[in-house]
Amino acid sequence: MMEASSAKGLNQTASKPEPQEKERGNPSIADLQPQRRRQQQAQSIWHPNDWSYAAEGGKHALFRYAGTACDISGHLLRITKNDLAKSSSVHAENEGEDSTASFSRTCKVIEFMEEPASQSFHRKIVQPLLGHCYLDLARLVRLPASCCAQLYHRTLASGSIPPSRLPTWKWKVDDGTKSDKIDPIVQECVKATLLRDHTHLSPHPRLLPPASPTSVTFIDSCKQAKDISVEIKPKAGYITSSPLVLPGHRCKYFRTRYSMQQELMQKGHVQKGWRIVQEGKEERRQSAENTKVHHGTFAPSNYSPLDLFSGNAIQVQKALTDLSQNMQNNFRVWRNGRQIFGEDETPSENDCQTMLDDLFNKSGIGVYSSDPKSTLLDVITKTVSRVLDRESLLSNMLSMQQLDVIDGDGAVKVYERLVHLCEGSNDEAELILDEAALIALDGFALGQRAFTASSSSHSSSDSLFASSPYTIPTCNSLDILLNEIAQFQTLLHACIQEGKSPDEEIMNASHAKCIECVNQLSKEACIYLLQNWLLSLALCDVSFFVTFRVLKDREVESIKEECQSREHGGLALCSIQDGAPASHAMAVHYEVKIVDCDPKPANKLRERGEVESKFQFINE
């Protein structure tokens, strides 16, 4: 069996930023204009029939590869649904009504060195903060429009798309002022990204057969292994403590945003897209069974992000258990790339027992359960808890989330100030913010912190923005604002620990002082605060996968536990039975990967006031 080693020491090593090639100093805004390079990196032939619909979000569709090409095995293709619909229209115009008859069995795919804004954000900002081993960079490809049209028609014909999602598969013009003509570039090719399919593990070098270590391909690994993958949407792991919170929204000081959103959904003030999909499926089921259609009462989750991000193994386990008992859109489980658990997915009792047998037989432990579903979920959550306790992902994520020191209410005020400084132009303010999101401190990607000379006196900003990748500007009003925020945080935390609320007059006075400071901020100060707030927002809306495989005894002889690295996943011993001897611990190979971490567009700030206004109903 594997030998246990110090997880904490390994975590510290794993969390250090890894060296990259030296970059230039801070680029100017002009440096961030879209690159015009069209250097061809690689060209290959794909078979569209090797790709099948896997999942979708509001904007993008994902297609899973099932072919035999080693360089793209274990990958997903991510394309905007609007581009798919446009491609279909182009193909129909070029080939006539019976366009499906002219689809080619192959298509030529070109991969470019061009770096889109999202990938630049990942490489320059997120990876150095989060850890390079937790975020894989995507590959940018261009597909012929005919290939995308084929994917579009095959997906629509498959019936895999939830009916509530079908309207998002229609070609939509961005707004009423833009032409509805198709971009000539889209007529020829469509941008897409290749992403790792994190429902499968990559081979670990120490687990390859010693006789032929290079002979095991990803395809072979997937055929032989039985990977279990858990997707978690953790949400915000902190409670706001900003004096910029509006007086009518001060419920935010005492509850997590997730908890309040649950209450708002229960009261009907907030409707989430996944709820619409779920209710649509329930309607179709009841209709098929000729039963009266009715919507079930929404059951709020007991999950608290504070538990998940606590750093305490017992609380992390509680958080995962709460998620598994009311999954909603925050917890899903796959086995070999097929979803087995979700809000409206669950395997049969026999299937659960079969999976339990497979898990325990691999580790040499036999088990029979009278409630195999609960036992299986318990085994899965305990394994995931053990993995997360070993890795630094959650603590790194929390540090990034806590860059929000102004709250959504404050972000609205700062945004209004920035628009004012941009002569009333929302478009100009948002363009500046979107470009500024990619401008990191000098040497930041190398793990260096190169503060400006003026920032050395910012004791408050040093504590509030210790993890910030951005350069703090010189602005007296910003200094006063950050100092007031820091003082208010200290007061609020002390009162909460004593079980009481701060004095109303003190909170009102602090709020008024902060609003006065916001109205005197420079343009650079507004940008800095919103840079950090948007980065925090992005990290509050991500998902991460914990994928693992139970190892057989012959695979783990003389192998020590190790944390995940940039080159390969980790190895761990997981005790899944309370009070069981160490010899009954399961040895697992695992990977932890974050997804859906694109930069948040600044135009989200336009409607943020309406989003935050919902919290007034919490006080009812």
Image: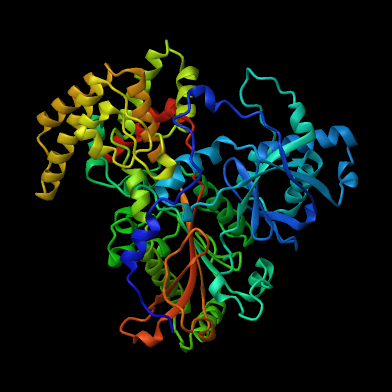
Q: Is residue 211 left or right of residue 491?
A: right
Image quadrant holding the N terminus, namely bottom left
Seen at 16% across and 35% down, the residue is 488
Q: Is residue 134 visible?
A: yes
The quarter of the picture where the C terminus appears is top left
The one nearer the camera, 283 or 318, is: 318
User: Where does the image place residue 92, in percent across and percent down from the top left?
Assistant: 84, 36
Q: Residue 200 lies in what quarter of the image?
A: bottom right
> Is 518 on the left-hand or right-hand side of 360?
left
Percent position of residue 378, x then y: 41, 73
Say left or right for 264 vs 543: left
The image quarter containing residue 264 is top left
| Depth order, front residue of 499/416 | 416
Residue at left offset 9%, top offset 49%: 498
Q: Is residue 318 visible?
A: no
- The one of 276 and 548 positioned closer to us in this rendering: 548
Q: Residue 568, how many percent across, how many down?
A: 52, 64
In this picture, is 564 found above or below 90? below
Residue 5 location (% of width, % of height): 35, 74
